[in-house]
Amino acid sequence: MSAEQESVDTIIIGGGLSGLYTAFMLTKKKKSFVLLEARPRVGGRILSPAHNGFFTDLGPSWYWPARNPRVNALVKALDLAGYPQFESGLCRFQARDGQTETIPGYPMNPPGWRLDNGMISLVNGLCSRIPGDRIRLNHPVCKIKRLDNGARVTVGCLDQVPQCRLEASSVILALPPRLAAGSILFTPDLPHDLTQAMLRASTWMAGQAKFFALYDKADWRRSGLSGQGFSLCGPLGEIHDGSGKTDSPYGLTGFVGIPALRRKDSQTMIQAILGQLALLYGHTAAQPVSVYYQDWAQEPFTATEYDQRTAHNHPEFLPPSGKTSTWNNTLHFAGSETADDFGGYLEGALSSAERAVLSLG
């Protein structure tokens, strides 16, 4: 059976924040486009499971109003609101031998903020302003072929996905360069130095796992603790108070410090984390009303085999091989890892999308 074919001005590949912001800007410009997302949901690494109206951020958690003008502007444009990260009180520290002590805290500088209703509110706000028929879920892209006046994108190389083809004057890759280089067949081949640069570009959070526990009470606050914690033995390496603006429900959230290749199944990890929280914050910390765990290294539309080693220090992200486009300005790079500034952050996702849309003319 022949593949279904469709033509538009622009094809956006990737439905994370960068791809959605690109679609939002093209909608305002009244441009013809489609957004192709491999997952059955939009948001990419923004993932915020709901618990009784509260949203637990298992991907990006903060933005910094003093340093993120684009995020600030988008929050206002979408009529959203944020609140400062709770950091009042002392911090807990766990040495390599498991010994714990209470130390002064390390407040973020500049202060970090969380969003009411979680970071997913950015995703929902953008989607509400993009025509619904322009976003195609369950559309994994496997091939991009350069044409004389644009490119042809093939979707659905997996057996369970119906195949279709789309043609456009421009294609915007709004996904991590490493993921694009490892999962999409480009015809003709991209330049060798560009492909290698894409494969070398780390994907922020791709090797990480996050945990979120919710409570009816915050006993750690009553003990003079901020909820902040650091551990050299794990399983969590970094912990923060994840409570809502109005406090209830209260939360503890953190990043797993164990490398992806050494992590066990989710239930084993959750039990180990709860034991660690009890040691750091008291026995009630092991009795949350709900827990959430996300291992991003197990997400095929986020991580590749090269991402199994967690990038603990924030890499310096730049456009791959210094290029923001290729194929004679047909193929454009977006996505936070290609940003000229704030790469890997929400701000970088927005700035790379702005750059890609501007390059379309």
Image (cartoon, grey):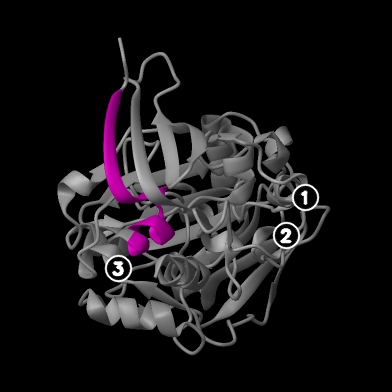
Q: Around disc 3, counting alpha carbons within 10 Å, would you say few (fewer than 14), some (14 to 19), or many (20 or more)?
A: some
The answer to whether residue 239 is left or right of residue 194 is left
Q: Position of residue 344 (x, y in %)?
A: 58, 63
Q: Quadrant of the N terminus?
A: top left
User: Outermost residue, right direction?
Assistant: 97
Q: How far is mark 1 from mark 2, CA to CA?
A: 7 Å
Is residue 17 a member of the stretch shown in magenta? yes
Determine the CA span between mark 2 and mark 3: 26 Å
The reply to whether discs 1 and 2 touch (Cβ–Cβ < 8 Å) is yes
- Residue topped by disc 3: 25
> Distance between the Cα atoms at labels 1 and 3?
31 Å
Q: Residue furthest front?
A: 148
Residue 319 position, x and y percent, is: 64, 64
Query: Pointer 2: what residue?
Result: 321
Residue 103, above or below 346: below
SS label for mark 3: helix
Picture residue at 30% right of the left edge, 77% below the top? 75
Looking at the image, tell me whether mark 1 or mark 3 is earlier in sequence order.
3
User: Where on the picture, by quarter, is residue 248?
Assistant: bottom left
- The magenta segment is 4-22
Q: Is residue 190 left or right of residue 270?
A: right
Q: Is residue 169 left or right of residue 298?
A: left
Amino acid type assigned to the residue bearing label 3 in the image:
Met
- As drawn, 341 above or below 349: below
Task: Identify which residue is drawn at 35% across, 80% down.
Answer: 83
Identity, as a three-letter code, of the amino acid under mark 2: Ser
Magenta stretch encompasses residue 277 = no
Q: Is residue 79 visible?
A: yes
Q: Disc 1 marks which residue?
A: 193
Query: Dot 2: what SS?
Result: helix
Q: Toward which corner of the image does residue 309 lie, by quadrant?
A: top right
